[in-house]
Amino acid sequence: SLFLIDKIILRFEKQNVIVGGLIALIIVSSIIYLDFRQPDYDYENEVIEVAKFVSGLSGRINDYGYESYYVEVMDLEDKKFPILSSEINFQKKVIRLQGEAINEIIQDAKDKGLSYLAVTSAGQNDNQILSKIYHEEYNYPYLKKIYDSKNYGFKFNIKIFEINYNEFELA
């Protein structure tokens, strides 16, 4: 690519202007690239707060998107470093659910031993079936809401429900 730039510079009479323009273009494009990649620290802090809540729950929960990654990391919070990875007892707390309907998903949750169901608002959840629960929670009496991020004013919209399988069987 430097060969191409060298050929372009040699074709024009004002070589200093072209070199200056190329340098300016590189600097401006770098600044724009870095600015767009800037993380949303408030959102990340909210996700960590939710992960702390989830890691404190006694049972397992479904995968609610990339944000659920932090739940597994919360096991490290009580560890004193340096530590060998073999000394860390990671608990498989986040499980991926499958199903084409809400009843199938709840049955899959029961089969996999989940106690809790996390649902996010539309656009944040890769499972659109579960986002229906987020907006119509009162239609599911076997789900008891134990956490709602809106109560804390978070941008990360998530609700966590405890699943009552006895009521699910009756419904």
Image (spheres, rainbow, N blue to C red):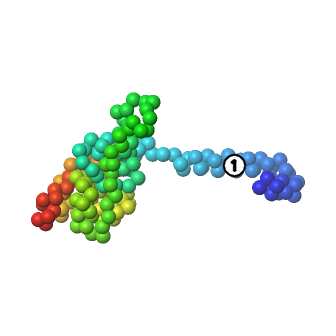
Q: Nearer the viewer, residue 133 or 82?
A: 82
| Side of 32 relative to 11 (left or right) | left
- Residue sitting at 64 percent across and 50 percent down? 29
Whole-percent x, y for residue 22 in the image: 75, 50
- Residue sitting at 39 percent across and 36 percent down? 87
| Side of 78 relative to 23 (left or right) | left
The answer to whether 155 is drawn above or below residue 133 in the figure is above
Whole-percent x, y for residue 155 in the image: 35, 49
**Amino acid type, residue under disc 1 in the picture:** Ile
Could you say which quadrant of the image residue 65 lies in? bottom left
The answer to whether 9 is drawn above or below residue 40 in the figure is below
Does residue 157 appear in this view?
no
Q: What residue is disc 1 on?
A: 26
Disc 1: CA contacts within 10 A as few (<14), some (14-19) or many (>=20): few
Whole-percent x, y for residue 118 in the image: 28, 54
| Side of 144 relative to 45 (left or right) | left
Could you say which quadrant of the image residue 119 lies in? bottom left
| Side of 115 relative to 23 (left or right) | left
